[in-house]
Image: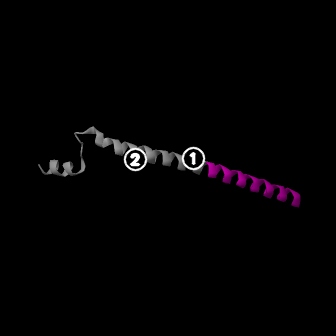
């Protein structure tokens, strides 16, 4: 009996399935924002990687010129 009461506090399945619509809309919105954030992180990371590669090449050139 106590276990059923505890589980009923956390589990709620509405009879009217239209109550799921706002939750699905919010889920879709957050998924879109998560996707856009991930794409932004990847783009910035690639840009930083290119800068690092250019810096490494300049340092290697300077090391060769010093020899």
Specify few, some or many for label 2: CA neighbours under 10 Å numbering under 14, 14-19, or 20 or more: few
| Quarter of the C terminus within the rendering | bottom right
Q: Residue 49: say if magenta.
A: yes
Along the line of sight, the residue nearer the viewer: 35 or 49: 35
Q: Along the horizontal axis of the image, is 1 left or right of 31?
A: left
State which mark lies toward you, 2 or 1.
Answer: 2
Q: Position of residue 46 (x, y in %)?
A: 65, 49
Q: Is residue 9 visible?
A: yes
- Under circle 2, the secondary element is helix
Distance between the Cα atoms at labels 2 and 1? 20 Å
The quarter holding residue 27 reads top left
- Under circle 1, the secondary element is helix
The secondary structure that dominates the magenta segment is helix
Q: Position of residue 38 (x, y in %)?
A: 54, 48
Residue range (magenta): 43-67
Q: Along the horizontal axis of the image, is 25 left or right of 62?
A: left
Along the line of sight, the residue nearer the viewer: 30 or 10: 30
Q: Position of residue 57 (x, y in %)?
A: 78, 53
Q: Residue 66: say if magenta.
A: yes
Q: Position of residue 30 (x, y in %)?
A: 44, 48
Residue on which disc 1 sits:
39
**Picture residue at 37% right of the left edge, 42% below the top:** 24
The quarter holding residue 20 reads top left
**Picture residue at 71% right of the left edge, 51% below the top:** 50
Specify few, some or many for label 1: CA neighbours under 10 Å numbering under 14, 14-19, or 20 or more: few
Residue on which disc 2 sits:
26
Along the line of sight, the residue nearer the viewer: 65 or 53: 53
């Amino acid at each position: 009996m106590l276990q059923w009461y505890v589980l009923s506090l956390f589990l709620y399945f509405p009879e009217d399935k239209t109550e799921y619509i706002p939750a699905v809309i919010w889920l879709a919105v957050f998924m879109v924002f998560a996707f856009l954030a991930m794409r932004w992180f990847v783009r910035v990371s690639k840009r930083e990687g290119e800068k690092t590669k250019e810096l490494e090449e300049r340092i290697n050139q300077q090391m060769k010129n010093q020899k």
